[in-house]
Image (cartoon, rainbow, N blue to C red):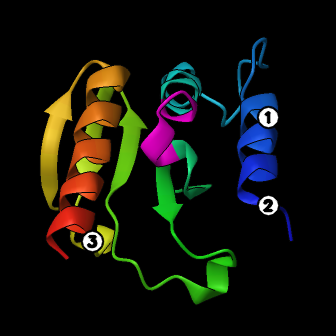
Amino acid sequence: MRSREEEWNVLLEEFKPPQPPDSLATEEMRELISAASENPTLRSLYPAVSMWSLTFSEADLLQDVEDALPAISAADGEYRVLAWPHTKDICLFLTSDPAEAVEFTAEWIANRESSG
């Protein structure tokens, strides 16, 4: 099992350019991962990419996830912050700027932690 920091480094490496034209590593996801990795709140969480979304966990093992944290979806030039459970596709925030999506998500998590 990789540490949180190791997992961030793996994602940054896997999504760095150049990518082949048929790659699942889209430019939107690369920009999102890059922006999220620079945010201290999100960088402190365990990241994962699933179904065109960047997810976060306070758990150290993905099978222990119980946090109910939002995810950020990156597709078609849009970044959607999705509420938990992500399968319901409830959009909390929509933007064309990955940095704005990252900031919104980090603030949401920080507010959740300070009120909890």
How far is mark 2 from mark 1, CA to CA?
16 Å
- Between 116 and 16, the one lying in front of the other is 116
- Residue 23, position in %: x, y? 72, 30
Q: Nearer the viewer, mark 2 or mark 3?
A: 2
Going from N to C along the chain, the mark reached first, 2 or 1, is 2
How far is mark 3 from mark 1, CA to CA?
26 Å
Residue at image position (71%, 43%) is 8
Residue at image position (58%, 76%) is 59
Residue at image position (57%, 33%) is 37
What is the secondary structure assignment of the residue under circle 2?
loop
From the viewer's perspective, is residue 68 above or below residue 105? Answer: below
Q: Label 1 sits on what residue type? A: Glu
As drawn, the label of residue 73 is: none
- Where is residue 80, by image quadrant? top left
As drawn, the label of residue 84 is: 3
Residue at image position (35%, 22%) is 99
**Residue tagged by mark 1?**
14
